[in-house]
């Protein structure tokens, strides 16, 4: 069975600081991996995805994520956070079905 | 092109009533998904449709929940005899095929009094 964990329920960073959101998955093979963002009052928007190939993927809004097979991880990073990045972030895995993680809420301090 | 649309955006109902939630996917998308998001929670998978195949209903929480997809396009999620614990945001998503990037609608916020 697939599962996704996002160990951090809530993270607070200062504007301009770097960010890393953790995502770990459990699946017998290499799944497809996604990061979505849900801003307050908005729908979910895809930030980036990994299907195969280069393990470092670039997404929208300056985000990137790195797939590490040995760690079963797909952590999301951004070198400099903007106030508008405050939102809920969801990691998702597709193996046999789609499974979403519980989400990490990001707060940004001015 | 238009994105995924859902209606109504908000629905308030009384306990025991039936409700129908509608989803219009992106034209040409063969896969359609329903999720439930309770306050402060992640997404709970409910059901998905892929083309003309039998839907995967494995996420439906009880037999009060059902969904159909007519003509491979519009989908309706029906909740019978609503309970207060059904209160949540119901999200619909569509994709070109199962496993592809999902495009989400704005959701329907259901409140059961």
Image (cartoon, rainbow, N blue to C red):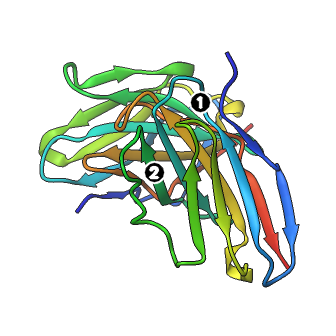
According to the picture, the residue beneath numbered tag 2 turns out to be B48
According to the picture, the residue beneath numbered tag 1 turns out to be A81
Q: Secondary structure at mark 2?
A: strand
Q: Secondary structure at mark 1?
A: loop
Q: In the drawing, does residue B95 fall left or right of residue A94?
A: right
| Number of marks present in the image shown | 2
Q: Nearer the viewer, residue A33 or A15?
A: A33
Q: Quadrant of the N terminus of chain B?
A: top right
Badge 2 crowding class, 10 Å Cα cut-off, few under 14, some 14 to 19, many 20 or more, is: many
Q: In the drawing, does residue A46 fall left or right of residue A26?
A: right
Identify the residue at the far front of this view. Answer: B71
**B30 w.r.t. B59: above or below:** above
**A49 w.r.t. B35: above or below:** above
Where residue A22 appears, as percent x and y from the top left, is 38, 48
> Which of the numbered marks, if any, corresponds to residue B38?
none
**At x 57% / y 66%, what residue is drawn?**
B66
**At x 45% / y 32%, what residue is drawn?**
B30
**At x 15% / y 40%, what residue is drawn?**
A69
Badge 1 crowding class, 10 Å Cα cut-off, few under 14, some 14 to 19, many 20 or more, is: many
Where residue A63 appears, as percent x and y from the top left, is 48, 25
**At x 17% / y 47%, what residue is drawn?**
A71
Chain letter behind tag 2: B
Alpha-carbon span between mark 1 and mark 2: 35 Å
Where residue B9 appears, as percent x and y from the top left, is 82, 49
Residue A11 visible in the shown view:
no
Where residue A95 appears, as percent x and y from the top left, is 25, 46
């Amino acid at each position: 069975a697939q599962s996704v964990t996002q160990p951090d329920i809530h993270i607070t960073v200062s504007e301009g600081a770097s960010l890393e959101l953790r995502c770990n998955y459990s699946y017998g093979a290499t799944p497809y991996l996604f990061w979505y963002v849900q801003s307050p009052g908005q729908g979910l928007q895809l930030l980036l995805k990994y299907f195969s190939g280069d393990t470092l993927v670039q997404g929208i809004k300056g985000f990137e994520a790195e797939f590490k097979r040995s760690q079963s991880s797909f952590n999301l990073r951004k070198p400099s956070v903007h106030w508008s990045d405050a939102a809920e972030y969801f990691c998702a895995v597709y193996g046999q079905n789609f499974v979403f993680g519980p989400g990490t809420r990001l707060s940004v301090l001015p | 092109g238009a994105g995924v649309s859902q209606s109504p955006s908000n629905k308030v109902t009384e306990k025991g009533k039936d409700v129908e939630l509608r989803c219009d996917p992106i034209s040409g998308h063969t896969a359609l998904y329903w999720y439930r998001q309770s306050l402060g929670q992640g997404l709970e998978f409910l059901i998905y449709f892929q083309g003309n195949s039998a839907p995967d209903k494995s996420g439906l929480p009880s037999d009060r929940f059902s969904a159909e997809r007519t003509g491979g396009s519009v989908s309706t999620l029906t909740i019978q005899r609503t309970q207060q614990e059904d209160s949540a945001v119901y999200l619909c998503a569509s994709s070109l095929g199962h496993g592809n990037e999902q495009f989400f609608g704005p959701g329907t916020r259901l409140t059961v009094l």
